[in-house]
Image: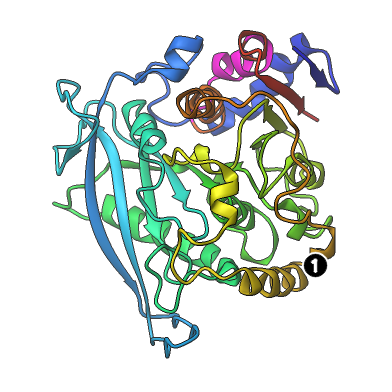
Amino acid sequence: MPRTASLPVLPLVVVLAAFLAACASASQDSVPIATTLEAATERGPFGAGVMTLELVDTSRPTEPNRDFPGADQRTLVVELWYPADSTATQPEERDAALDRSKAPYPLIVFAHGLGGNRRQSVSYTQHLASHGYIVAAPDFPLSHLGAPGGPRLKAVLEQPKDVSFLIASLLGFSEEDGHPLEDAIDGEAIGVTGHSLGALTSLLTVYGASRDPRVQAALPIAVPGCLLSEEIADDLSVPLLVLGGTRDLLTPPASNRGAYDIANPPRYLVELLGANHIRFADVDLEDGQILALELVPGLRERDIISDAREVAQALGGDASACPTFGTGADDDQPLSPERQRELLRAFATPFFDGYLRGSEEAAAFLQEELPGLIPEARVEFEME
């Protein structure tokens, strides 16, 4: 399987040692780390509890959108997964008691795609919770499936601030006596991940004017990297893993490559041969069905195009460089939906274990062993 790197693999462990030690969370020695393919892809030692929160940011308005007049505040409905009692047999257990034996836990924010919602990728978020992460997934006010006026691509410009508000709220709950999340979150171990427009949200949370310095690692999935300025990363160095599919008709390989190219090390690019766009979520469709734009009420192609231009202008990117919908993908044999999501878990688990838990073993597995175990993946990385 092809793999390229700018440095020999063995010295990378030495290079990473100081960095990972600095990033290590308080619970790294007590939670099992993903250093085998089975450990990375299968559910972890915890059950997955889930609760729903409603958070209101009174400091920022919700913009008008088509026939929606706007609002004086921004409301985030948030699904929160967390490590729970390992005896739970269901994929998730609502309002289960938090397993406090290994707390505090790293926090990961998941950002949904355009016309998606907070529960679009539960196989991924439940998996991370079972591996000892608290995962928060909001419905963004103007890009989720039920957004007033219909979901809009340009809403992404406000979403990084929503992520920061969400992080601040959860850290506050962790410090609040008697709250179900009391002492649950490691504020020094925060990551972001997201799909499609949510992938762009995750990048804007670590780069540019909306950067949140509390975020220590990012894993964007199928990202429209063409909308970003080549200088947006500046001299920032935030661990990044860009993951995409070669059969993606919405954000084809060149789009993910663009996001990787603008980043500073440590950075990873993972291309899954035969993976499409939509199946990274728990949606078993072909991209062509999504391109018809008839599955999501209020999602209009003309607005997507005009919004993309507006976003690119705001971010210093070039919308004309973005591939036309339905072009730019390869003709690889398609992956099954289950396999595509399994491979997402395979790379995400050791990445976050490496960069949020500070595990040298997980980082070494991600670089040295995992690529050779997955023939459907092309992996490229650079450490310095």
- Which image quarter is the N terminus in? top right
Residue at x-position 40% and y-position 71%: 147
Q: How many marks?
A: 1
State the image coordinates of residue 353 (x, y, percent, origin top left): 50, 26
Left or right placement of residue 379 versus residue 230 in this view: left
State the image coordinates of residue 233 (x, y, percent, origin top left): 76, 53
* 368 in magenta: yes
Residue underneath mark 1 = 316
Q: Badge 1 local density, few (<14 within 10 Å), some, or many (20+)?
A: some
Q: Which residues are magenta?
A: 357-369
Residue at x-position 81% and y-position 30%: 384
Q: Is residue 213 visible?
A: no
State the image coordinates of residue 292 (x, y, percent, origin top left): 57, 57
Most foreground residue, 219 or 33: 219
In terms of secondary structure, where does tag 1 sit? loop
Most foreground residue, 310 or 201: 310
Q: Is residue 68 above or below residue 133?
A: below
Left or right placement of residue 58 versus residue 378 in this view: left
State the image coordinates of residue 304 (x, y, percent, origin top left): 63, 68
